[in-house]
Amino acid sequence: MQTRARRGYDRTDDLIVSLLRENARASNTELGQKLNMSESAVRRRISNLISSGRIRRFTVEVDEAGSSSAITNVSVSPAVPTGQVSDRIRKVPGVETVYETAGQFDIAVVVKGANIGAVNGSVEAIRRVEGVINTNTTMVMRVVR
């Protein structure tokens, strides 16, 4: 197992990532003030975090009040490579995230839609994907962050 030092990350990098998770729009100057660092030092560290792959992208979180989501666990036929099934599922409208997993199920899928009917339509489409032999869906009642 690699240690944080061997990967080149330190406590300051962890703090920068944490602050960016709270507010990805924070300026380098704002981050520098919170960390007692110069703007250029923060900019350099963020650049290094991006080039190393630790930060892969910056995203937007929206208020999805009134929308619905579910987690669908998928069992895959041993005759079909899991990666192929994952790729097909990723193309289903409403699919937000696809995880290949170990355990009782081979794939976990996060599905989002404007309402329960839209989520159900996405789950039905997942069930029709070649290689899917079983699904187990759990509706999300509330997101706690």
Image (spheres, grey):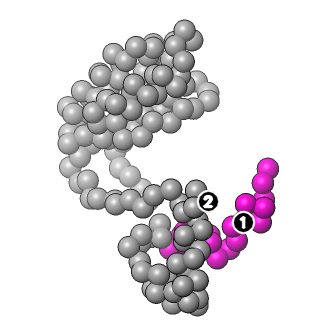
Residue type (three-letter) at the residue carrying disc 2: Ser
Q: Which portion, as a residue range, is magenta? A: 1-19
Which residue is drawn at the image coordinates 29% and 36% (left, top)?
Answer: 94
Q: Main secondary structure of the magenta part?
A: helix
Q: Nearer the viewer, residue 134 or 2?
A: 2
Q: Is residue 67 depicted above or below 138 in this figure?
A: below
Position of residue 10 in the picture relative to residue 111 (left or right): right
Instruction: Give neighbour class at mark 2: few <14, some 14-19, many 20+ (Cα, 10 Å).
Output: few
Q: Position of residue 27 (x, y in %)?
A: 42, 80
Is-magenta flag for residue 91?
Answer: no
Residue 60 at what x, y percent from top left? Answer: 34, 60
Q: Which residue is mark 1?
A: 8
Earlier sequence position, callout 2 versus callout 1: 1
Magenta-colored stretch includes residue 10: yes
Is residue 130 something that shows in the picture?
Answer: yes
Q: What residue is drawn where x is 41% and y is 72%? A: 23
Q: What number is the disc on residue 90?
A: none
- In percent of width and height, residue 86 lies at 46, 27
Report crowding for label 1: few under 14, some 14 to 19, many 20 or more residues within 10 A (C-alpha): few
Q: Secondary structure at mark 2?
A: helix
Q: Secondary structure at mark 1?
A: loop
Figure quadrant of residue 72: top left
Who's the residue at 62% across and 29% down the image?
102
Q: Which residue is mark 2?
A: 52
Mark 1 residue type: Gly
The quarter of the picture where the C terminus appears is: bottom left
